[in-house]
Image (cartoon, grey):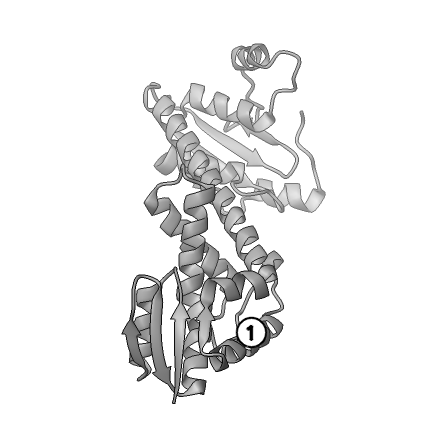
């Protein structure tokens, strides 16, 4: 049996619970200190898993509160969960190896091995400062957490901005009188165009002029112009012909669906789309 004094400022209740569940003796001295007794391997396993799960989550939450005070509590919780999920990838903690994925690739086995070795050294010394251990011996690990966290913040805020944009377009659409038109929206990687049932290109000079006046000296974005025409005409039905292969999220086709809801439908790989793909035809400007 070994007795160790452990200081941890984040997620102390979670560590205490983990140790107790593992059969260790736990005495809480104050808000940051525990005295723990148990087998060395038992202590190492619990501490290792704790740092890479409960402590990690609380650390992300803490950093978010400092670096992004504008976020709500709900947003911080959501971003923390997304960050943890992103770092773990499709795996979970297993055999004390931290699984990371994507651009935040972390040498998981190397870090896990270093962490376990550091824990063994400090447990043998009978005093462990968890935050000190991670900050001074896991700098790369914290950098990975920070990078992943900022990526998730940007993603969540971008998603929120997009939802607000869609809501605004829906509001504008709702005050328009619906027409009995059916329009076809063709979405390709380089451009978007609109046709009527007869295959004639739909252009709106008034909308184009208004867009040009709103952005003097700038090229009018084709997708913005197409959406303005759709909102202005407020068709009864929109048939979406999605010919794109590398459209970034959110694609124009997805946005049309989100704005027009039940008024929009996919063409289901119609003959026109098949012909355009087979012939490599490009729609006129």
Can you say whether 16 is above or below 199 in the image? Answer: below
How would you rate the neighbour count of disc 1 (Cα within 10 Å): few for under 14, some for 14-19, many for 20 or more?
A: many
Q: Residue at image x 46%, y 71%?
A: 128
Instruction: Give the x, y percent position of residue 175.
Output: 32, 19
Residue 265: quarter of image: top left
What residue is drawn where x is 43% and y is 74%? Answer: 47
Q: Tell me which residue sits at (62%, 11%) in the image.
A: 216
Residue found farthest to the right: 280
Measuring from the top left, give residue 36's x and y in whole percent: 35, 78
Asked if residue 188 is positioned above or below residue 1 in the image, the reply reads: above
Does residue 106 show up?
yes
Q: Quadrant of residue 212?
A: top right
Residue furthest to the bottom: 1
The residue depicted at 67 percent of the width and 25 percent of the height is: 285
Say what secondary structure mark 1 lies in: helix
Q: Is residue 98 above or below residue 173?
A: below
Q: Relative to residue 151, is residue 23 depicted above or below?
A: below
Which residue is at the front of the view, 60 or 178?
A: 60
For disc 1, the marked residue is 112
Measured as percent of width and height from the top left, residue 46 is found at 41, 77
Judging depth in this view, the residue of 274 and 31 nearest the camera is 31
- Residue 227 lies left or right of residue 247; in this view the side is left
């Amino acid at each position: 049996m070994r007795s160790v004094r452990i200081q941890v400022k984040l997620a102390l209740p979670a560590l205490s619970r983990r140790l107790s569940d593992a059969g260790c003796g736990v005495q809480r001295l104050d808000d940051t200190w525990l005295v723990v007794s148990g087998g060395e391997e038992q202590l190492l396993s619990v501490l290792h898993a704790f740092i890479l799960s409960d402590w990690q989550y609380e650390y992300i939450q803490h950093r978010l509160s400092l670096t992004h005070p504008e976020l709500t509590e709900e947003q911080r919780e959501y971003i923390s969960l997304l960050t943890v999920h992103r770092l773990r990838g499709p795996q979970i903690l297993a055999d004390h190896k931290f699984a990371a994925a994507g651009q935040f690739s972390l040498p998981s086995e190397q870090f896990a091995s270093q962490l376990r070795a550091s824990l063994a050294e400090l447990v043998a010394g009978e005093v462990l400062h968890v935050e000190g251990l991670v900050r001074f011996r896991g700098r790369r690990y914290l950098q990975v957490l920070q990078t992943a966290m900022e990526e998730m913040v940007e993603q969540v805020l971008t998603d929120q901005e997009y939802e607000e944009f869609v809501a605004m377009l829906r509001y504008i659409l709702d005050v328009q009188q619906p027409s009995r038109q059916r329009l076809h929206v063709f979405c390709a990687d380089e451009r978007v165009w609109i046709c009527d049932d007869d295959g004639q290109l739909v252009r709106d000079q008034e909308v184009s002029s208004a867009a040009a006046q709103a952005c003097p000296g700038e090229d009018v974005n084709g997708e913005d112009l197409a959406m303005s025409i759709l909102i202005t005409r407020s068709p009864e039905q929109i048939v979406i012909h999605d010919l794109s292969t590398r459209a970034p999220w959110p694609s124009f086709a997805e946005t049309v669906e989100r704005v027009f809801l039940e008024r929009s439908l996919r063409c289901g790989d119609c003959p026109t789309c098949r012909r355009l793909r087979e012939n490599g035809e490009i729609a006129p400007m």
